[in-house]
Structures are given as structure tokens and as C-alpha cells.
Amino acid sequence: MTLLILFRHLDILTCKIASSHFPIGHQSSMITRPRSSSRGVSADIHAMSEDPKYAVEMRDVTKRFGEVLANDSVSLAVAARSIHAIIGENGAGKSTAMNILYGFYTADEGEILLDGEKRSINSPRDAIRLGLGMVHQHFMLVEPLTVTENIVLGAEPVAGLSLDYKRARSRVREISEQYGLRIDPDARVEHLSVGQQQRVEILKTLYRGARLLILDEPTAVLTPQEVDEIFAILRGLREQGKTIIIITHKLSEVLELSDNITVMRDGRVVGNLSTAGATASGLARMMVGREVLLRVEKQEAQAGASVLEVRSLSLRGKAGNASLEELSFHVRAGEILGIAGVEGNGQTELIEIIAGLRAQTAGEILLEGRPIDRLNPHERKRRGIAHIPEDRHRRGLVLPFDLADNSILGVHQDAPISGALLLNRKVIEERAKRLVRQYDVRPPNIALAARALSGGNQQKLIVAREFDINPKLILVAQPTRGVDIGATEFIHRKLVELRDEGAAVLLVSAELDEVLNLSDRVIVIFEGRIVGEVDPKSVTEEEIGLMMTGGRKEAGERGSRGPEEQESGERRSEGAEE
């Protein structure tokens, strides 16, 4: 590590380097079962893998975490110079398999071959040395540093005792031009868009000589324009000889981008197929083991009186910078109002203010015509406000608590859950069992710690708890982030049911398809301001994407989504996963 970077950012770098080399932990909802073989699939893979064109092969890889069988004889082969997608539900074992490939975990059984040669990968350092690179869903960047400093971090060219910044910068520019990753090497990462930060992560792997790139949810927080750009970049990398593995929940993007697909379910590979012959419905069926509705089915909204009214809401930081600026809107009973915007433009602050988790600096919030600004979160919940937070670990659950205790958060002071002196354990456990059963939380063990559940099942537990209060207003932030197709279908259906029963729903999602397919009206937010309202049935993704990044449509240019684009939008309203 160079003295320059150490002295400037020692505390930040320590955290970032540690997080990039050591896994935080493993969560899975899979129950223990006797080991069964997937030899039928393995035999097919083994027959193919004699061909030297395969860049990577995993043969009968098995991994256990205590009593949990996370990977059960996983076998797959990734063709060189191809884009290979790995898909599956929460807890299917996708991330575990890729973490084994990248050296975060060591397999209990099985073997890994790179370019036909058996390799031992015991750490990310081994993986990098062998030409593997990984771009995580949550970027491993140090924001105060420049693009160049981030890219060379840990592998710096030096001149004497200091960083040879000129040589590092020249090399970064050379690689970025070679692979079409346009980026200013001197820009500070904190000033870059999410899409540009992703380019920096890709450049980090290429700087270290990666021939095979693993990308986890590469389009999770990108605008439509940025999705097109990253697709072009990945195709360009493939054309220049790179092999790419993507883990994604968006089946339409799998069909558009990949060459081959591996489908996993319950820790096993249930299918290896060419993308050319695949369909979204067929892939969903393989992932879940049943038919899945890939689009949101809902009737026209029958909107009633205003439930939520926000008047001139503003939020300013300590330095006087505005996170929210003069926001005014309303949500009526029986409708879903969606908020579209690139993450970081004030959506989080807005939802937290309405939920009572932070105070605005100006403006007023009314629930059914009555001000609620002075009410705390518990009092707002009593008035009928349900809140599904965007960060389920930080705001939605107490991970060491069991499912029963997590099921009463926010209502634990209310009868009959709370008695005269103590909590009523019998009532709590009966309620928890009912919610777990009704919302299909797996495994259905209310004594289990919340941290033991997969992300999708954690989300279903939060949804069950919040929806059970018969809310008048539902604040929903990123409802299907990290949630698989089956759970997404379930959550969408429940939201529409509550809307039809007269609830008002305020929806924030980084998934533009989700906003357009669920919402009855959509407002677009940019830099803390509402820049327009659009009709989700007629606006195109290009138009709304332009508004989300601060652009404007010219008058009279408003288009409509034709049949093909509407069908694409329906296909892309799928659930998220691990």
C-alpha cells in the first residue's frame, strides 16, 4: 500500500479492503435434507466439458454451512468468450457457487477447472492471480479517492516510496479506451453516477488482468439508459475475448444479453440451456417449480378521497444543501402512486420523513386531512401508516431476534400483544404462526432467528407484519429488492389487493418496470425536486429515464408504449433474488 493513499485515507481503506476480501456471512432458508445427486445434469456437463472451449467448469461442487446444504453437486460449464447467466430463487445457491469460484468460500467436495485445468482457489487473491474478477452488487469503492486511485488500490505502481500517479493514470486511461469504458481517471468517485461507478469496478478487474468477470446484479440500480450502456460494454468485452458470468433476477435481460443459462433451485442445478431456445415463462417455471405470473394483473384504480397530502416539504442538511426541495403531492385511497428516480435523489429521505423516522425542515404532512408532523413513528403506525423500509436489515428487522419477536415490531406496545406488565407470549406466537403461514415465510419456524432467513423470506416477514395492521397508507420502499420471482409475484399481488380494499400506496423502487407496472400514477424526482408526473400506461422508458437524469421532454413529444414495449415491460416485472 502506498504511503500517499495510506496517509490520506487509512481508516476508509481499512474497512473497504477488509470488506472486499472477507464475506460478511451466509444466509439461507434451505432446510436440511439427505444429500441427493444431480448426476443427470452432471453427466451432461462432463460430456460437454472435454471441449477446451470452456473457460470455467464446476464439477459436483458441494458446500454445507452447518446443517444447511447450500450447494448440492453443482455442475456447470461456461463457454469461453460468452456471457453466461446464473438464475434462481432466493436460497437457490447461486451466490454460494460464485463465492466458491471467486475464493470467498472453499467447497467441501467437487472441483473447479479453468481452461480445462483443475485449479485450487482458496482466496480472492488466488482467483485474481488466475484471471478472475468480481463486480459486487454493492460497489467496493472509496468515494473520496479518484478513479485512478480506486482502480490501482492494492496493486499500485510506485516511484520510490510513493504512488506513481502519472503512470497509474496513463494505464487506467489506456485500459478504459481499449475496452470502451469512457471515464475521467481524475474524477472523484463520490461525484460519479452509479453507472459510472460500475465502470470503475469493471476497470478494477481489467487492470488486474481479469479474463473472466463475475457480475452480481449488474443492472440493479441503473437507469434504462445506463442499462443499455452496460449491455454494450459487456458485449464489447465478450467480443474482445472476455468471458462473463452474470447473476441477475431480470429474466428479460437474461434473454437479451446472455448466450447460455444455468438455472438453480434448492442448491442444485436444474437446467443448463442455450438462451436461444429459452422463454421467460419457461425459465421462471424451472426456477420456482410451478407456473409464475410474470406481469402485474390489476383492474383500473377506483381512487377515492385523499389519504396522504404533502405540502411544500423540504429537507436541508447541516451545510444548507437541499435533499428535498418544496415537494407537494397527494395519494388517494385506492391508488398506487409511484415515485421514479435514480437512487440518491431524495426518495429515502421522503419516505423516512413520512414514516416519522426523521424531521423535515419545512412543509407539512397530512393524513386524512390532519397534520401528523409532531407524531412519532409508533403514533403514526397507530393512525394506520405501514412502512416497508428499503433497508430491511437496518430498519425492518432485528436480525438476532426470532421471527415471533420480529413480527410484533412497531405494535409491541399495543393490546393484546402487550399485557398490563408483560408481553403476551401466547398471543405473539399465535400471531407469528398465522403470519408465517399466510405469507409463506420459509422455513416456518417462528423460533428461528431472522438472520437465518433468505432475503426474500425476510422481506415477506416484514410485509406480513406491516400489512396485518389494516393500513390506511402503505409506504413501500424497494419492496422486491433481493427478492426472487415467486416472492415478488406474491408481494405485488398483496399490494394490489390492499389498493383494491381502499388503502393508499406510496411506492418507491429502483426497478423502473416495477414502478410502471404497479403504479396508477407516477411522479418523477430528480435532485430532491419533482420534475413531472406521467401516466405509466403511456410513457416510454426512454422518456421517463431522461426525466430521472434531469432531462426534459419537448412539448408534444410524449409517446406511448406500443404493444411490443408493453409486453417487454410485463416480462421485466420479475422478482429479485439473492
Image: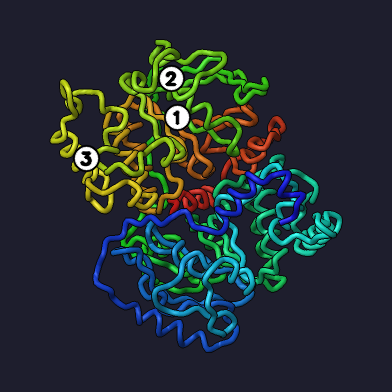
Q: Nearer the viewer, residue 258 or 32?
A: 32
Q: Where 161 sits versus 349, above or below?
A: below
Work out which quarter of the rendered image holds the N terminus and state it: bottom right
Instruction: Identify which amino acid the numbered label 2 is placed on.
Output: Leu
Residue at the image position 59 percent from the left and 78 percent from the top: 55
**Residue 70: where, in percent of width, then height?**
36, 65
Q: What is the secondary structure assignment of the residue under circle 2? A: strand
Q: Which residue is mark 2?
A: 308
Q: CA distance from mark 3 to mark 1?
A: 26 Å
Estimate how packed mark 2 is, as few (under 14), some (14 to 19) or many (20 or more) residues with alpha carbons within 10 Å.
many
**Residue 92: where, in percent of width, then height?**
38, 62
Q: Which residue is mark 3?
A: 432
Marked residue nearer the N-terminal end (1 or 2)? 2
Asked whether residue 173 appears in the rendered view, the answer is no
**CB under 8 Å between discs 1 and 2:** yes
Residue 385 placement: quadrant? top left
Marked residue nearer the N-terminal end (3 or 1)? 3
Instruction: Identify which amino acid the numbered label 1 is placed on.
Output: Leu
Residue 543 placement: quadrant? top right
Q: Residue furthest left?
A: 426
Q: Residue furthest top?
A: 370
Asked whether residue 132 appears in the rendered view, the answer is yes
Q: What is the secondary structure assignment of the residue under circle 3? A: helix
Q: What is the secondary structure assignment of the residue under circle 1? A: strand
Q: Nearer the viewer, residue 346 or 407?
A: 407
Residue at the image position 54 percent from the left and 58 percent from the top: 216
Estimate how packed mark 1 is, as few (under 14), some (14 to 19) or many (20 or more) residues with alpha carbons within 10 Å.
many
